[in-house]
Amino acid sequence: MTKTIFTLALIVFSFATFAQQPKVKEQETSNAEKFSERSGSLIQKEFIDIGDIKKCELKVLHYTDLISNQKTSALKFEYEYKSSYSSDTKAAVLDADEIDGLVKSIKIIQDKIFPSTPANYTEVSFRSRSGFEAGCYSKKDSWSAYMKLEKFDSNSYVFMDKEDLSKLLTLLEQAKSKL
């Protein structure tokens, strides 16, 4: 009898523990990626090279559903991460409607954040639907800029100088003209 009660208690405890396990975070996706992954569609992807910054390539993507003739566009960031043992391609897709927010964020960082000297360690960041992040962080008496292509991947960082942000703005303006 006590063996049965012990077994039942163990089973109930196991279920309670299993139910409390944290859920694995899902990768966020852009609207353009969702469009391209719809079932029952025939998707054409056109890639237009814009340029690169710190070995991170920017490309405009035009998606067309050849069945319904619906279209959408996005901006893709692609970076090849290399370690001593392997290499991997990191990528992020920004929807066309998010590019203006990124441009505005970079201008605010250049005009208001970089001229300031924070008293404490400070981070400033822009985040897209897909988990792409761009921003800056303070280092003693200066700021460093970055892009992070994949939300849960610390190897997807692209570190930039203050001057690189001007080049990034130029590339973003070129990309907007091709969307």
Image (cartoon, rainbow, N blue to C red):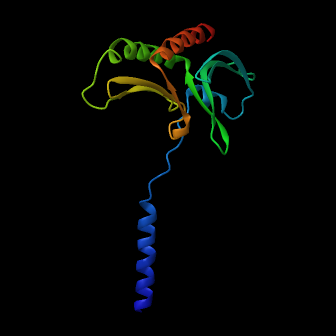
Q: Quadrant of the C terminus?
A: top right
> Residue 172 appears in which quarter of the rendering?
top right
Q: Is residue 92 visible?
A: yes
- Above or below, 107 relative to 29: above
Which residue is at 51% across, 41% downward?
Answer: 152
> Residue 64 appears in which quarter of the rendering?
top right
> Residue 145 appears in which quarter of the rendering?
top left
Q: Quadrant of the N terminus?
A: bottom left
Q: Position of residue 158 (x, y in %)?
A: 53, 28
Q: Position of residue 118 (x, y in %)?
A: 27, 25
* Residue sitting nearer the eye, 11 or 135: 135
Left or right of 86 in this view: 113 = left
- Above or below, 13 relative to 167: below
User: For the image shown, how many numbered marks are present on the structure?
Assistant: 0
* Residue sitting nearer the eye, 163 or 6: 163
Q: Is residue 128 visible?
A: no
- Above or below, 16 relative to 97: below
Which residue sits furthest bottom? Answer: 1
Q: Position of residue 165 (x, y in %)?
A: 48, 16
Which residue is at 72% across, 19% downward?
Answer: 46
Which residue is at 50% across, 50% downward?
Answer: 24
* Residue sitting nearer the eye, 4 or 178: 178
Q: Position of residue 28 (x, y in %)?
A: 52, 36
* Residue sitting nearer the eye, 62 or 90: 90
